[in-house]
Image: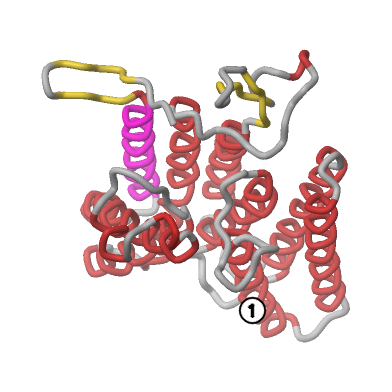
Amino acid sequence: MSNPIAVYSGDTVLYWSSIIITLGLLAALFMTLSLQRTNKGSTAAVWLMLPLAVILSVPLCRALHWYCHREQYVGFLQAVTDYSSGSYVFAGALLGAFLAALIVSPLNTRSTASLLDAFAPGAALAIAFIRLSSLFNSSCLSKIAVTTPILQHLPLAAGYVDASGQVEYRFATFFFHFLVMLLLCRVLLGFFFARRNVPMASGSRDGNAARMFLVFYSASELVLDSTRYDSSYLPINGFISFVQIVSAACILGVLIYYSVHSVRANGFRWYHPALWLLWLLTVAGVGITEYLVQRHGDWYLSCYGAMGLACVLMAGVVYRMYLTCCEED
C-alpha cells in the first residue's frame, strides 16, 4: 500500500501517517496530563506511562496479528522483531496501556483506576488520530463497495487504484472510526467532569471513565471491524473476528462488574434481569446481522444499520447498570 512521504531530506524520510500518529500521541499525552492534575494525581506517572504503553503495545499488537495471520510471517520471532511488513491487532494496545498503568502505579498518588480515568479521553483521541493516519497509507478501506457517485467521498467513501488501474470507492472504515473516536473523546470528557466525584454505593469513585471508554470503544469495534476486508480471525473460527470476540467480552466484563455492585447495593431488583435480558437481545441482534451481512452481500446498509443500533443499545444497558450503582441514583 502507498504511504505518501511528507519530508524527504538525505537519509531522513517522514511519512504523513507517522506524523499524524505522533501528533495524536502528543495530544493524548497533554490531555492526560491535564486530567491527571484535575484528579490530583502524579504527572510523573503519566510521563512514564504513555511511552511505556507504546513500547508494550507494539509487540503485543504484532503478536496477536501473528497468531491470527501466521501465513504472513516466517515465525513468531520474525513477527515481533521485523516491522517492515505485516500489520497489527489493535486490541494489544489496550492490554499494553493497562500493563503500563500497573507498572507505574507506585508513582501515582491515587489509584491505578484514577490514572486510567485520566487516560481514557486521551486514548480515544489517540485512536482517532491513528485511524485518520490510515487515509495516507490506503488502508482506510472496507469490503463495502460504494457505487453511488454522490456518496463517493469522505466521510463515507475513500478511493484507491486497483490492480487494473481503475479507481474504486469503498466505505472509509477507518475515517468513520476517526469521527466516532472524536465523538467518544468529547463524551468521555463530559463524563469525566460530571461523574468523577459521584461515588458508587461501594464508595469507589475511580475507574468509571475508563470502563465507559472500554464499553463504547468496544461497541464501535463490534460494528466497524465487521466492515473491514482484513479482519483478523482465530485459527479455529472464521465467522466472528478476534476483535469482535474481545470487544463483546470487554462489554460483558464491565456489565458483570456493575451488576455485582448494583445487586450488593440495592438487593436483587426487577430491573437487573430486565437489563440482562435486553443485553442478551442486543448480542443476538449483532450475531444475526453479522450472519446476514456475510450471507447477503447487498444487505450492507440495513444490516450495519441494525447492528449499529444494537451496539448502541448494548453500551446503553451497561451505562444504565452503572447508574444503578451510584448513590445519587
- In the image, the segment drawn in magenta is 17-38
Give the residue drawn at x 75%, y 54%: 311
Q: Amino acid at mark 1?
A: His
- Residue 302, quarter of the rendered image: top right
Q: Which residue is mark 1?
A: 261
Left or right of 84? Residue 135 is right
| Residue ranking furthest to the left | 10
Q: Relative to 145, does residue 67 appear above or below in the rendering?
A: below
Left or right of 234? Residue 320 is right
Left or right of 308? Residue 214 is left
Give the residue drawn at x 53%, y 43%: 189
Give the residue drawn at x 61%, y 24%: 158
The answer to whether residue 215 is magenta is: no
Q: Quadrant of the N terminus?
A: top left
Percent position of residue 201, x then y: 62, 75
Give the residue drawn at x 84%, y 78%: 273
Percent position of residue 198, x then y: 58, 60
Q: Nearer the viewer, residue 205 or 270?
A: 270
